Image (spheres, rainbow, N blue to C red):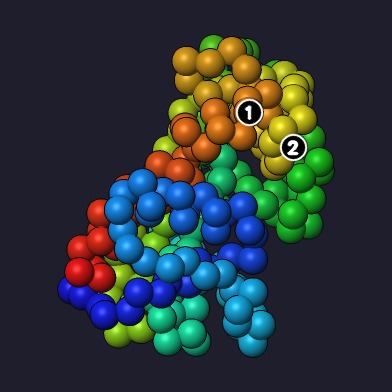
């Protein structure tokens, strides 16, 4: 499974994600140039109709690989709460009904676990990172960050559910961590790092 391309599209217009993946691949000595969707304005949003993080990541990666004619990586992630049977899960970004309304999503989740005792507030962030080639070949790697949900938001450094999520072994929420501390343990970083050797194999 290989390709001669030394350029790869990360299916995002988020500059922070691009920088993160560039750093991870550089640390893994994977010689590939990462570009984002800003170089492909004709590529629109891909509907996330999958039932798992991996399915959604693959949908996006394949769509971008076909449109751009280059290998593509896409990711999908969310928070999974034990007391809610693993929800919001793939619906994390639109849990309150409106996509991307972080405050409404967070407040709804807090309301739903308000009567759940602390010892039963286990949760984890999950991320699936998918690599797709224009040929249709694909690979998926996953990353998980376990922790728990707290009573009220704390910290200003994060987004989404970061202010109410305390990682395992920590007393601070993700939003109270520095960017470097978050990147070192994040579910997305873990998924990208797991995908790095796969990418090295596929472009060798």
Camera sees residue 127: no
Instruction: Check disc 1: other Cα within 10 Å, few if <14, some if 14-19, many if 20+.
Output: few
Disc 2 vs disc 1: Cβ atoms closer than 8 Å? no
* Residue 65 x/y as whole percent: 43, 80
Which image quarter: residue 79?
top right
Instruction: Check disc 2: other Cα within 10 Å, few if <14, some if 14-19, many if 20+.
Output: many
* Residue 121 x/y as whole percent: 57, 21
The residue located at (30%, 85%) in the rendering is: 135
Comparing marks 2 and 1, which lies closer to the viewer?
A: 1
Q: Which residue is mark 2?
A: 106
* Residue 181 x/y as whole percent: 54, 28
Left or right: 24, with 195 as reference point: right
* Residue 10 x/y as whole percent: 50, 66
Camera sees residue 15: yes
Helix, strand or loop at disc 1? loop
Please tell me the numbered disc located at residue 202: none
The residue located at (42%, 87%) in the rendering is: 69
The residue located at (53%, 24%) in the rendering is: 167
Number of numbered labels in the structure image: 2
Specify which label sits upstream in the sequence, 2 or 1.
2
Please tell me the numbered disc located at residue 178: 1
Left or right: 119, with 104 as reference point: left
Q: Is residue 39 above or below residue 100?
A: below
Q: Is residue 9 above or below residue 168?
A: below
Q: Is residue 195 above or below residue 32?
A: above
For the residues marked 2 and 1, what is the alpha-carbon distance in whole angstroms?
A: 21 Å
Quadrant into which the N terminus falls: bottom left
Helix, strand or loop at disc 2? helix
Q: Is residue 74 above or below residue 113?
A: below
Quadrant into which the C terminus falls: bottom left
């Amino acid at each position: 499974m290989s390709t001669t391309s030394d350029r790869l599209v990360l299916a995002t217009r988020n500059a922070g994600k691009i920088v993160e993946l560039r750093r991870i691949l550089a640390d893994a000595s994977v010689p590939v140039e990462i570009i984002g969707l800003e170089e492909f304005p004709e590529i629109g949003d891909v509907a996330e109709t999958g039932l798992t993080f991996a399915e959604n990541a693959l949908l996006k990666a394949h769509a971008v690989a076909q449109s751009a004619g280059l290998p593509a990586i896409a990711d999908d992630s969310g928070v999974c709460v034990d007391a809610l049977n693993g929800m919001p899960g793939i619906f994390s970004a639109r849990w309150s009904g409106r996509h991307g309304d972080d405050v409404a999503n967070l407040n709804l989740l807090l309301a739903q676990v308000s009567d759940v005792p602390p010892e039963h507030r286990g949760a984890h962030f999950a991320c699936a990172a998918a690599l797709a080639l224009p040929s249709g070949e694909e690979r998926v790697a996953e990353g998980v960050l376990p922790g728990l949900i707290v009573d009220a938001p704390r910290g200003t450094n994060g987004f989404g559910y970061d202010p109410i999520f305390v990682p395992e072994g920590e007393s601070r929420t993700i939003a109270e961590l520095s960017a470097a501390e978050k990147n070192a343990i994040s579910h997305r970083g873990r998924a990208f790092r797991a995908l790095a050797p796969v990418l090295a194999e596929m472009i060798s």
